[in-house]
Amino acid sequence: MSKIPDLTLMVCTCFLFTQCVNNPILPRDISQLTLAEKNLVESDNRFGFKLFEEISGEEKNKNIFISPLSVAMALGMTYNGADGSTQEAMQKTLELSGLTLQEINESYKNLIELLTNLDEKVRFQIANSIWYREMFPVEDEFIEINKTYFDAEVSGLNFSAPNASNIINEWVNQKTDGKIEKIVDAPINPLTMMFLINAIYFKGIWTYEFDESQTKDDKFTLPDGSKKPCRMMSQENEFQYFENDEFQAIDLPYGNGDFRMTIFLPRAEKDVDYLIGELNQENWNLWMSSFRKMEVTLQLPKFTLNYEIELNDVLKGLGMEIAFNSSEADFTKMYEEEKVGANLYISKVKHKTFVEVNEEGTEAAAVTSVEMTLTTAVPFKLLMRIDRPFIFAIRENNSGTILFIGKIVEPTLG
């Protein structure tokens, strides 16, 4: 099964699709994926490689840490609301060609269940939510699809309330175990109608932990050749290892070995951006099949990173520009168009991540928010739907005398 790397200058993968083994707590063996599930994994891989390369091109000589799975899943929920050329553009960008919408949704549902129950020694959580402005006429089918297949929590919220963003951010904070506290800024844009949010949390203990007493002060060489102090962890052990003329690579297992960190170190004469350009599904499959168990002395710097990026330009560059176009975007499967009279489009895709690597293991989190906005303000009609028990009174207005008062818990006729 393929894996996706999220790389910093100290290249690492923390919580995506990994080498799989039998696990008795699973309803089925994760190595026995259906064809559609395997295709979705490879689609997410290809999208992740493109996304990472595009970001790296824009953020040269900067630390980068992203979760392609989080971005793909948030956009996957959004994809269910797209139609026409917007859907086609998203399909191409997300590498979903050849998969039906039903296959995509069912595969995500199964992968969420499998990945989050894979290793009892690793905490891996995936949470999805949809927050929409009260009175905005969201299509029932769109909501039900995302509830069913993405296990999305759906809430209508008064976006104009002072605490609206706090409510959403508290959900994010909770789902990332406090590692990412905020994704929605206050006040919320009056034209914003919906947020589609994915949150991922990972905490894995190394199968072979580093001895803290072996961690020493050291130097790390920066892209410009200068050196910066670091704390270097060290251990000798048997690891899955692979090298070629361009890099050395090592696979570090967590827990029972289902989740792993795969590190790629370019040769001294090679540039890390060049290696990033070599990341594609074909090379990845070749490299993953080349690892062999070897005795290795490993030195790895401890690091903590908070990363944030707005993905609008990146996703436009990958072919999704129409989804951000206020006049051309087509998300009519998301809302009742005849009740709105304005166009809905993606105004912002925000991505935040956190990672800490130390002697014990790795803790990482990611949040992706897709913000949906209308082209113009719409005066939604006030709705009072009396579909639950209520109280009523018959009164005389001038004197204020109440003539009758009652409670209806079950309307009856006759």
Image (cartoon, grey):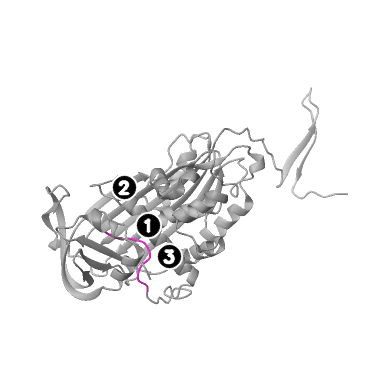
The residue beneath circle 3 is 41
Q: CA distance from mark 3 to mark 2?
A: 24 Å
Q: Is residue 156 visible?
A: yes
| Residue appearing at x 77%, y 41% in the figure | 406
Judged from the image, the secondary structure of the residue bearing numbered disc 1 is helix
| Element carrying mark 3 | helix
Q: Mark 1 or 2, which is nearer the eye? A: 1
Instruction: Write the residue at 54% across / 49% down.
Output: 85
| Residue 383 left/right relative to 110 | right
Task: Name which of mark 1 and mark 2 comes first in the sequence.
Answer: 1
- Range of residues picked out in magenta: 11-20
Sooner in the amino-acid sequence: mark 1 or mark 3: 3
Image disc number at residue 307 = 2
Asked whether 12 falls inside the magenta stretch, the response is: yes
Dot 2: few (<14), some (14–19), or many (≥20) neighbours within 10 Å? some
Image x and y of residue 142, in percent: 59, 53
Mark-to-mark CA distance, 1 and 2: 16 Å
Total count of labels: 3
For marks 1 and 3, give the CA distance: 10 Å
Q: Which mark is residue 48?
A: 1
259 w.r.t. 381: above or below: below
Residue at image location 56% in from the left, 33% down from the top: 376
Tell me the mark number nearer the camera, choosing from 3 and 2: 3
Q: Amino acid at mark 2?
A: Tyr
User: Where's the N terminus, which quadrant?
Assistant: bottom left
Give the residue type that dot 3 points to: Val
Marks 3 and 2 in Cβ contact (< 8 Å): no
What's the residue type where badge 1 is placed?
Gly
Residue extending farthest to the top is 398
| Picture coordinates of residue 212, whole percent (x, y) | 17, 61
Q: Position of residue 77 (x, y in %)?
A: 51, 54
